[in-house]
C-alpha cells in the first residue's frame, strides 16, 4: 500500500495487481486503451493532489467534483460525435434517407438515460445500476443514479475517521459537466449508501435548477418528448 503522505489519517491506494474487476477502467477506443493500472495511478495522484490542498472532506469532494466537470463536457462531445458517426455509417450502408443525427436531449429523462446508459458504458463498460426520481412532492427536481460498485472507489482505501468521504465525487463532477453541457443547470453530489451486498454502493444525487424545472413543465405541456 502507499499513502498520500505520512499522516495516519491519509487515504491509501490499492496496488494495481489487487484490482477486482477484469473490464477496462475508462474510455476505450480502437487505437488507444488506458490500462487499469495507469488509470489507478493517475486517479491516485489526482486524489493526492486534491488532498494536499484542502482542509476537510467537503473541500476534498468539491475539488474532485471540479476536476471531473471539464471531463464531462468533453465526454458529451465524444458521445455525440460517436453517435453521429454511427448514424451516418448506418445510413450509408442501408442507403436510407430517413436517418438523422441524434439531437441533444430537451427533457430531463432523455438526458438522464443518456448518462445512465451511454455515458456509463463509455466510462465503465456497463450501464449504471439504477435511475430513480424522488417520490417526495417537495423535491421534484431530484433524481438519483445508483452505482453498486463504483470503479473509482476500487483504488481508494479510506480510513475510518474519513468514512464519509466518497471519491466518486469525481464522477459526480463528470455528470454535472454533461448536464451543463446539454443546457441543464444541475448540482450533482455522491453519497455513500452501502448495503450488506454492496458495501461500496454510491448514489449520485442530481438536483436540477429552478429554470430547468420551469422549462420542463413548459415542454411537458407542449407535448415535447
Image (tube, helix red, strand yellow):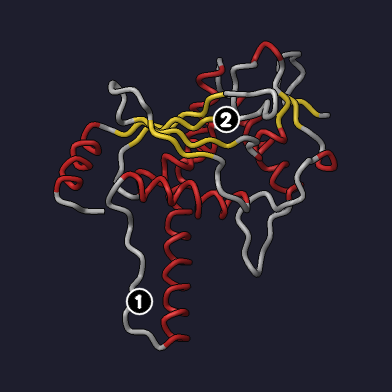
Q: In this view, does 112 lie to the left or right of 150?
A: left
The single residue placed furthest to the top in the displayed view is 161
Residue at 53% x, 31% y is 169
**Pointer 2 local density, CA inside 10 Å: few below 14, some 14–19, many at least 20:** many
Sequence-wise, the earlier of marks 2 and 1 is 1
Label 2: which residue? 202
Secondary structure beneath label 2: strand
Measured Cα–Cα span from mark 2 to mark 1: 38 Å
Q: In which quarter of the image is the N terminus?
A: top right
Asked whether 145 or 56 is in front, the reply is 145
Secondary structure beneath label 1: loop
Residue at 70% x, 53% y is 24
Residue at 42% x, 39% y is 176
Q: Is residue 181 left or right of residue 126?
A: left
Q: Where is residue 39 in the image (x, y as percent from the top left)?
A: 69, 46
Count of numbered badges drawn on the protein: 2
Label 1: which residue? 99
Amino acid at each position: 500500500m502507499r499513502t498520500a503522505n505520512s499522516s495516519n489519517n491519509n487515504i491509501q491506494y490499492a496496488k494495481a495487481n489487487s484490482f477486482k474487476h477484469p473490464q477496462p477502467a475508462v474510455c476505450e477506443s480502437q487505437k488507444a486503451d488506458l490500462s487499469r493500472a495507469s488509470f489507478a495511478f493517475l486517479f491516485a495522484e489526482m486524489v493526492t493532489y486534491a488532498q494536499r490542498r484542502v482542509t476537510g472532506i467537503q473541500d476534498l469532494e468539491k475539488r474532485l467534483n471540479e476536476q471531473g466537470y471539464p471531463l464531462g463536457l468533453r465526454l458529451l462531445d465524444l458521445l455525440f460525435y460517436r453517435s453521429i458517426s454511427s448514424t451516418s455509417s448506418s445510413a450509408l450502408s442501408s442507403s436510407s434517407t430517413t436517418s438523422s443525427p441524434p439531437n441533444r436531449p430537451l427533457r430531463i429523462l432523455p438526458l438522464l438515460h443518456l448518462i445512465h446508459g451511454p455515458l456509463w458504458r463509455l466510462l465503465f463498460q456497463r450501464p449504471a445500476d439504477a435511475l430513480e426520481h424522488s417520490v417526495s412532492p417537495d423535491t421534484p427536481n431530484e433524481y438519483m443514479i445508483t452505482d453498486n460498485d463504483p470503479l473509482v472507489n476500487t483504488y481508494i482505501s479510506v480510513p475510518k475517521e474519513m468514512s464519509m468521504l466518497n471519491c466518486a465525487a469525481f464522477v459526480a463532477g463528470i455528470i454535472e459537466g454533461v448536464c451543463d453541457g446539454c443546457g441543464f443547470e444541475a448540482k450533482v453530489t455522491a453519497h455513500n449508501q452501502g448495503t450488506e451486498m454492496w458495501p461500496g454502493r454510491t448514489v449520485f444525487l442530481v438536483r436540477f435548477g429552478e429554470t430547468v424545472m420551469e422549462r420542463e413543465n413548459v415542454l411537458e405541456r407542449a407535448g415535447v418528448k
